[in-house]
Amino acid sequence: MSGALQDWKSQKKPFAAVVTAPVFWLALFFVAPMAIVWLYSFGQNAGPADIEISGTLDNYKRATEWLYVSIFLKSFAVATLTTLLCLIIGFPVAMAITFAAPKWRPWLLLGIMLPFWTNLLIRTYALMALMGTNGYMNKGLGELWEGASWLRTLVGMQPLDAWTPVQLLYNNFAVVLGLVYVHLPFMVLPLYSALDRLDKSLIEASLDLGAGHFKTFMQIVVPLAAPGIVAGVMITLIPALGAYLTPDLMGGTDSQMIANVIERQFKRANDWPFGAALSFLLIYAMFILIAFQSMRANKVKAA
Amino acid sequence: MPSPMFQRCALTLVSAACLLLSAQAQAKPFKWSSASDIPTLDIHSQNNALGNGVHAAIYDSLVYYNSKTFKVEPRLATSWKEVSPTQYRFTLRADVKFSDGSALTADDVVFSLERARAKTSNFHVYTQGFSRIAKVDARTVDIILSGPNPVLLNQLTELRIMSKAWAEKNKSVDPKDIKTKEEYFAHRNANGTGPFMLKSWEQDVRLTLVRNPNWWGKLEGNVTEIVYSPIKAEATRIAALLSGEVDLVLEYNGDIAQAMVEDSDIGFVIPKEGSQLNSDNLCIPKGAPHPKNAHAFINYLLDAEAGKKITETILYPTPNDAAKALMPDAYKNNPVIFPPADVLAKCEYAKFNSELQPKYEEAFTRVRAA
């Protein structure tokens, strides 16, 4: 991009100085533990606290049984739905921030990032207090219902039956809502950075040349924002796929995702090798997603 | 992951894993709450959902909705018939007494229905279409309508009956005018024929109803006292309600004993098939650098006074007899903390089975994936 940036190959020493610390960090705290877990996935329990790494593929064989494949597929479906909803909700938000007056923009961005100031667990419990059968949402709906009932008595009609709270929590709906709530900022921020770089005169040109707003949006804004969309989708889809806390706290008995199953292998079932195999299948799936994306990115660059 | 080999040591806390139910056989006051207090005890002064609900516990109406089917059923009126499309004849239940001991008569019904039509009443919506109320004999009343009315019975469910003599004696013939602040007998006191009677009412603080021993009907359930306290602050009320968010949990007895201190409407049940026992252990890992300190700490915990303080907080069955001896009888005789021997005999310690545990979890995963 810029001529001032030098190729790292011609400046090996300074590059090595800069890169050593992060590489060391990654090797020690990421690669090494993951390698241990990877080895476990080829092992079997030899006692309550011992794992014998025997090179067996039994764990993978068991992990590819339909029971676990179906949970993988369900997790993928939930993550995809979450990503899609985040995209649909996040795009207008990112657009609004882009086109807002410059003095408002930092405040709006702050608003997007504000939830990160609080721990995810606290935010999840706050959502649960909101959505419970005795929560604020049901309270509000109950008040409206009573109001409607009272209006009916005013005109001489029979009052409505007593309000029965809606079950908002502990089902798949709650899981998707919780995941969308948690991941929305991850979608909005890359979208915003893509839209911010977009040359606005192109939009004006498109409108001047007779294209409608919708056509301009679909043919100018969306293609130009594509890198941001792809980045947002990846950055939302991957954590959503491995979501653990939200389905655990907000989900019902049928809302388990693959991360919950993995957790049980490491804790209650005390079957670390199997848990490791499941974890690595999840990691491989994410690898494939990222590989697809970079292949696509390379193709775009080459074209 | 590699867990050190544990050397088992002293102190064992036995606890049974179990179920908690909200229903309970023992009679205790039923306590409830919402945002505001009832506006008045005067049954014709304010048409307010909360107030009407409370009034219905103290005062009977001629007919009322069955709470399960929501169909209109006899209450003070045992039967009724359509004399003509604009005249309905109601037969009153015999031997009904107000809580002050006086008997219900047709005069009281005529008086109460007319009272609901008074200028200061807020129940006109329920007396719409009434032309006249007439006493036929001591146990028969006619309602004469200005036109055919298909919802007459529904209207009557909200028109409660008060004693005429009581109202006249206490200068409460007309409903309390809600626009005035003056004291009014029927606003602060009640005398109905209903299943409950007023024990006390401190406005905005507490309303207590007790069972009416002379009620003509048979009350379902075991509630003998109802205590209503309005909680204005949303957050406080939500916190109080949140504890009712779930009805059933799987918990150890000590945790439930702690919860029962705060909420008397919680029970503890051990499945009749038995349950699992668990002990907390104090262990010193092999090769621990300061075993002496560990022993000193264990000795301290086994001290009777220290054990008593721990037990007072955790409410688990203490294995420390000296500490138990210091505890009050309420603890020692608590069946939640110390389940009867025949129940405990069915419980057993769980043993970790490395073969079965993954299979058990797989079955659990299968159920949850279904």
Image (cartoon, rainbow, N blue to C red):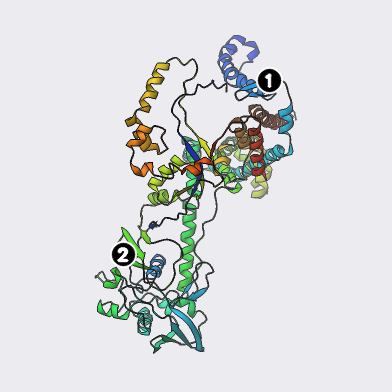
- Tell me, yes or no, whether the two marked residues, 2 and 1, touch with CB atoms within 8 Å: no
Query: x, y (%) of residue A19?
Result: 58, 15
* Residue at mark 2: B199
Badge 1 sits on which subunit?
Answer: A
Q: Amino acid at mark 1?
A: Ile
Q: Amino acid at mark 2?
A: Lys
* Residue at mark 1: A53
Disc 1 element: strand
Q: Locate the N terminus of chain A and report the quarter of the image it occupies.
A: top right
Query: x, y (%) of residue B296?
Result: 37, 20
Q: As drawn, is B159 to the left or to the right of B82?
A: left
Inter-mark Cα distance, 2 to 1: 74 Å
Q: Residues within 10 Å of mark 2 (few under 14, many from 20)?
A: some
Query: x, y (%) of residue A232?
Result: 62, 36
Badge 2 sits on which subunit?
Answer: B
Q: Locate the C terminus of chain A and report the quarter of the image it occupies.
A: top right
A223, B281: nearer the viewer: B281
